[in-house]
Image: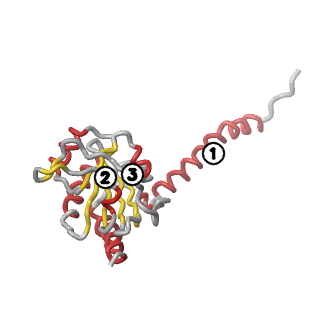
Amino acid sequence: MSAPATSDQPHSRRWLVALPLIGFLAVAGLFLLRLYGGDPSRIPSALIGRPAPQITLPALEGLVHNGTPVPGLDPAVFKGKVSVVNVWASWCVPCHDEAPLLTALAKDTRLQIIGINYKDSPDNARRFLGRYGNPFTAVGADSNGRGSIEWGVYGVPETFVVGRDGTIRYKLVGPVTPANLDRVLKVEIEKALKAGS
């Protein structure tokens, strides 16, 4: 004959059942705190302070500007001019939001804007640029995403500032917005312009 159940046994079983749930909630809380507790655009990049990746990407098929084909990405383009490199795709919703801001930024003749078109079809990419305007002096087609991996891209959009010496100076994760354009990106561009003076 077994001993009669004590009142402590059901209470201790409830705690045993609740422990995994409590553990999960604690981990989820830490994750959310890290995700939303800081500025996600400030994710550090191992490439900052290093030369831009020496990768060549083909031109976006059929893309022309004033009747001239727009070139692809050649690492030599970074020497001598401050560059803003934007990784984008036509299927990327935030890329649509930032496109007019990049077009406005392209009016600054002190710099050049280079595009890396990430895992996109040439037709869709050209339609995208036809809709918003083409701010890019060169567009490299990264159809398989390997070039973007070399740049340390987590996802699209991402934007880099590259100095006149070809060194990556800054990385913005996420879209260019009116707030971070003035408060962050233009500040970093000015630093890069002064560094090469």
In space, the residues marked 3 and 2 are separated at their CA atoms by 8 Å
Residue type highlighted by circle 2: Leu
Camera-nearest residue between 163 and 44: 163
Outermost residue, right side: 1
| Residue under pointer 1 | 23
- Give the distance between the C-alpha atoms of the residues marked 1 and 3, in whole angstroms: 45 Å
Q: Secondary structure at mark 2?
A: loop
Residue 35: percent from left, percent from top: 47, 54
Disc 3 target residue: 55
Q: Nearer the viewer, mark 1 or mark 3?
A: 3
- Name the residue carrying label 2: 73
Measuring from the top left, give residue 38's x and y in whole percent: 46, 61
Residue at figure coordinates x 39%, y 47% from the top left: 147
Considering only vertical position in the picture, is 63 above or below 121? below
Q: Local crowd at mark 2 within 10 Å, few (<14), some, or many (≥20)?
A: many
Sequence-wise, the earlier of marks 3 and 2 is: 3
Q: Where 106 falls versus 130 (above or below)? A: below
Determine which quarter of the picture holds residue 90: top left
Q: Earlier in the sequence, mark 1 or mark 3?
A: 1
Q: Amino acid at mark 3?
A: Ile
- On the image, the x and y values in percent for residue 131 come to 15, 47
Please tell me which of labels 1 and 2 falls first in the chain: 1
CB atoms of marks 1 and 3 within 8 Å: no
Q: Is residue 24 above or below residue 83?
A: above
Q: Between 47 and 2, which is closer to the camera in this rendering?
A: 47
